[in-house]
Image: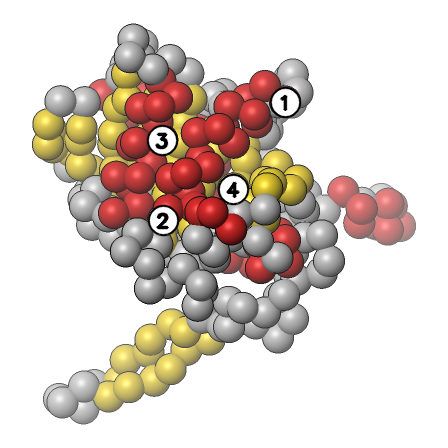
Amino acid sequence: MRILVTNDDGINAPGLKVLETIAADLAGPQGEVWVVAPAFEQSGVAHCISYTHPTMIAKMGERRFAAEGSPADCVLAGLHDVMKGAPPDLVLSGVNRGNNSAENALYSGTLGGAMEGALQGLPAMALSQYLGPRNFGLENPFEAALAHGAGLIRSILQAMPEDGSDYRLFYNINFPPVPAGEVLGARAAPQGWRPDTVFSVEPHSSPSGRRFLWIRGGDQQVRTAPGSDAAVNLDGYISVTPMRADLTAHDALAALKAIE
């Protein structure tokens, strides 16, 4: 198996090392793991692409490249430059430092990388490690993802339906905020919503008097609806959420018949 790996925390992020280990396990001794990751952190860029300026790319080692762009840029670079003519069998993005459950999924560069893989017609998965009081202080906060990632991905690949849709499935995987030995299993879960947990801004002034705004997130320990992603994560389960890039609100189309 040939696997393309990217992330949004940057090429030096510890979570990327974890994902490389997972990918090497999946690929096997005869397989290949290719890394094309952002040169600098790209958290929160979602599915952004560098459409108006070029992306510099540099070889950092054998099958390892850094690109000055977003995770989606990195997937494009991997498919159409680095691995041109011999595409991967699977695109993996992560392992993100922090969860991409609930509304976080909409902002996530980690998911943006997986989404681009799916738009390019490839199986793709985004992996994120939820952080909380039970794992934040561990020597390796990513140990749940490291211990359970490869086996879970194999199970998802075996269970994946044939997908001939225009907008191909990709998978949002979130590992719970617990040590590896306390993971209770995996759950297929819809994307949830954390009540009263939204992004906001916090203003500050620089020494020169200029005004700046910092983006602030909300409480990540707030539960979503029972059975949805962040709820099962906080219960100790890995959440697996199938997604598509189709943003149409299909349930609302009928209500718009009156305008026709």
CB within 8 Å, label 3 to label 2: no
Tell me if residue 107 can be seen.
no
Amino acid at circle 1: Ala
Q: Position of residue 70 (x, y in %)?
A: 31, 44
Judging by the rendered image, the residue that carries numbered circle 3 is 22
* Sequence-wise first label, 3 or 4: 3
Q: Nearer the viewer, residue 205 or 224?
A: 224
- The mark lying in front, picked from 2 and 1, is 2
Q: CA distance from mark 4 to mark 1?
A: 15 Å
- Vertical placement of 70 versus 234: above or below? above
User: Which residue in the structure is indicated by mark 2?
Assistant: 142
Q: Position of residue 21 (x, y in %)?
A: 30, 31
User: Crowding at label 1, few (<14), some or many (≥20) Cα neighbours within 10 Å?
Assistant: few
**CA separation in Å, label 3 and label 2:** 12 Å
Residue, disc 1: 159
Q: Nearer the viewer, mark 3 or mark 4?
A: 3
User: Label 4: which residue?
Assistant: 173
- Per the image, label 2 sits on a secondary structure element best described as loop
Side of 226 relative to 135 (left or right): right
- Amino acid at pointer 3: Ile
